[in-house]
Amino acid sequence: MVDQFNQFGGALFGGPVWPYLWPVIWNLIKIIVVVAPLMVCVAYLTLWERKGIGFTQLRPGPNRVGPMGLLTPIADAVKLIFKEIIRPTAAHKGLFFLGPIMTIMPALAAWAVVPFGPEVALANVNAGLLFLMAVTSLEVYGVIIAGWASNSKYAFLGALRASAQMVSYEIAMGFCLVIVLMVAGSMNMTDIVMGQSKGRMADVGLSFLSWNWLPLFPVFIVYFISGLAETNRHPFDVVEGESEIVAGHMIEYSGMSFAMFFLAEYANMILVSMLCVLLFLGGWLSPFAILDFIPGWIWLGIKVFVVVTMFLWVRATFPRYRYDQIMRLGWKIFIPVTLIWLVVVGLWMQTPLNIWH
């Protein structure tokens, strides 16, 4: 059906007049199809978080706007859109407005190579994993720019903390991705998922025991916790530790500029959860062979929802780390663990007990 629509559009805009116009329009349509539902998911993730934390504290959470509070995210979005964006007098005008854009852009651009099914991705490129690592590492620049351009000591302190924390945990996450790349033998995201459908356990119908989470369990745990730190979520949210430095690098922002930081944080949560599912939890593959009749995108949605809910559960459960504890965890525990596991997996792959290739 998608190919037929593409051919129809090509025929409509083809011919001698606009031969190059249809590919641009077609790509824009595909981008809108991915980004529009993502924005809806981001909006309702905020509601799910507030409802979930309310549940853990034995209270109902937001329940005023719409039935059971279901229109709360819409009300929040409308409020932020119509609020004035106030620029502090001492702030650097150009960079002050560039910061939020630089933060949200990588969070959305990374979705270009994320597959939603065997042949369903905006760009099914062979260097998908490399693209993801490169694009997501750009986000730290937006935070640094926002903190510096605000000309506020709180914002600057928040930006310093954020950049140091993101860079520290990016190294551990990078090693996790390298280990997955080693066992999959490909940087293509679709190939990484399809590689998890093979194995002895998959042959007897227990597919979930063939996924990467089991042989790479320490890497899976490190990746998940590094994802919490990378997205500045509890218990690693010293960047916006309300009791110390108020809202960190976002403190001087209001209106849609603030909303961009907010959207980027939640879009990143969904992205990290999606990558966790694709790399370790079998993507769109069903856990048991007898459940293969359920479409893959439903399995993908269920798994991402569960991993995102884990993010919220961690926030509701654990107290905030001190800044020096966060740095120690990243540099003295996670990076050595991933390096050791990298060597272990490398040696494992050279023995007759190799379970991957």
Image: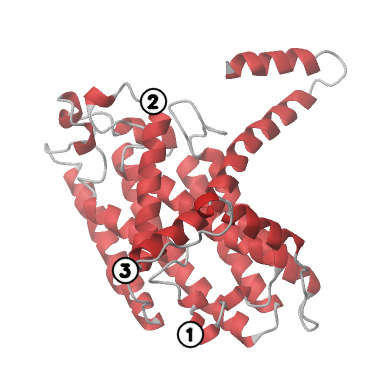
Q: Nearer the viewer, residue 246 or 57?
A: 57
Query: How far across and how far down the image is residue 185, in percent?
Result: 34, 37
Residue annotated with mark 3: 317
For the residue marked with disc 3, what is the amino acid? Thr
Residue annotated with mark 1: 243
Lower position in the chain sequence, tag 1 or tag 2 = 1
Query: How far across and how far down the image is residue 66, in percent?
Result: 58, 51
Residue annotated with mark 2: 295
User: Spatial distance from mark 1 to mark 2, Cα to Cα?
Assistant: 46 Å
Q: Nearer the viewer, residue 320 or 326?
A: 320
Give me the residue at 18% from left, 41% from top: 350
Of circles 2 and 3, the one toward us is 3
Give me the residue at 74% from left, 29% from top: 25
Task: Answer yes or no: is residue 172 visible.
Answer: no
Spot the residue most to the left.
352
Q: Which element type, helix, strand or loop, lies under badge 2? A: loop
Q: Which element type, helix, strand or loop, lies under badge 3? A: helix
Query: How far across and how far down the image is residue 191, in percent?
Result: 39, 32
Q: Is residue 178 left or right of residue 15?
A: left
Lower position in the chain sequence, tag 1 or tag 3 = 1
Q: Which element type, helix, strand or loop, lies under badge 1? A: helix
Query: How far across and how far down the image is residue 305, in percent?
Result: 40, 46
Q: Is residue 84 left or right of residue 348?
A: right
User: Spatial distance from mark 1 to mark 3, Cα to Cα?
Assistant: 18 Å
For the residue marked with disc 1, what is the amino acid? Ser
Crowd tier of the residue under label 1, counting other residues whose Cα lies within 10 Å: few below 14, some 14–19, many 20 or above: few
Spot the residue most to the right.
17
